[in-house]
Amino acid sequence: MTSSSLQDLARLRRVRDRIDREYAQPLDVEALARGVHMSAGHLSREFKRAYGESPYSYLMTRRIERAMALLRRGDLSVTEVCFEVGCSSLGTFSTRFTELVGMSPSAYRREAAGETEGMPACVAKQVTRPIRNREAPARAPKLA
């Protein structure tokens, strides 16, 4: 591996760590790229090559993961959770949440509280972690 490749990997790790830390802040690819002295296009290509998804997808996955934990807690409304995790549009948040989790945030809030009850938080986080790059499992329709 060349010195340049190692430097790029270190920069990508810094970007990923920043997203993990600051997921609730307004972040965009241009700002992330500036922070590591890369162009936005180069950052996006290299990040996807290294981690299998774009920086934006990674950010949204982190936000949805945190939203799932807040919704399981049950003391915040879906709108409050949306803004708490750094999303500025309830519609975009709901769409992304549904894509990753397979149900709407309100349905998740109703159903998930009981599914992880009594489970240690660290186990609940692993069991309920959203999985990017794979469609959410189809749910069988409920019969009335």
Image (spheres, rainbow, N blue to C red):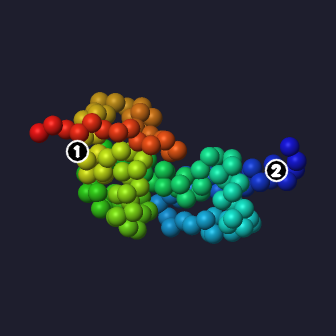
Q: Is residue 45 left or right of residue 144?
A: right
**Extreme-right residue of the structure:** 2
In the rendering, which numbered label is found on residue 5?
2
- Tell me: residue 118, above or below residue 29: above
Residue 96 in view: yes
For image coordinates 74% across by 51% down, the residue present is 10
Picture quarter with the C terminus: top left
- Tell me: residue 19, above or below residue 122: below
Q: Which residue is mark 1?
A: 110
Mark found first going from the N terminus, 1 or 2: 2
Residue 84 placement: quadrant: bottom left
| Callout 2 crowding tier (Cα within 10 Å): few <14, some 14–19, many ≥20 | few
Q: Amino acid at mark 1?
A: Arg
In the rendering, which numbered label is found on residue 61?
none
Whole-percent x, y for residue 28 in the image: 57, 67
Whole-percent x, y for residue 25 in the image: 50, 64
Picture quarter with the N terminus: top right
For image coordinates 59% across by 57% down, the residue present is 55
For image coordinates 23% across by 45% down, the residue present is 110
Q: Amino acid at mark 2?
A: Ser
Residue 36 in view: no
What is the secondary structure assignment of the residue under circle 2?
A: helix
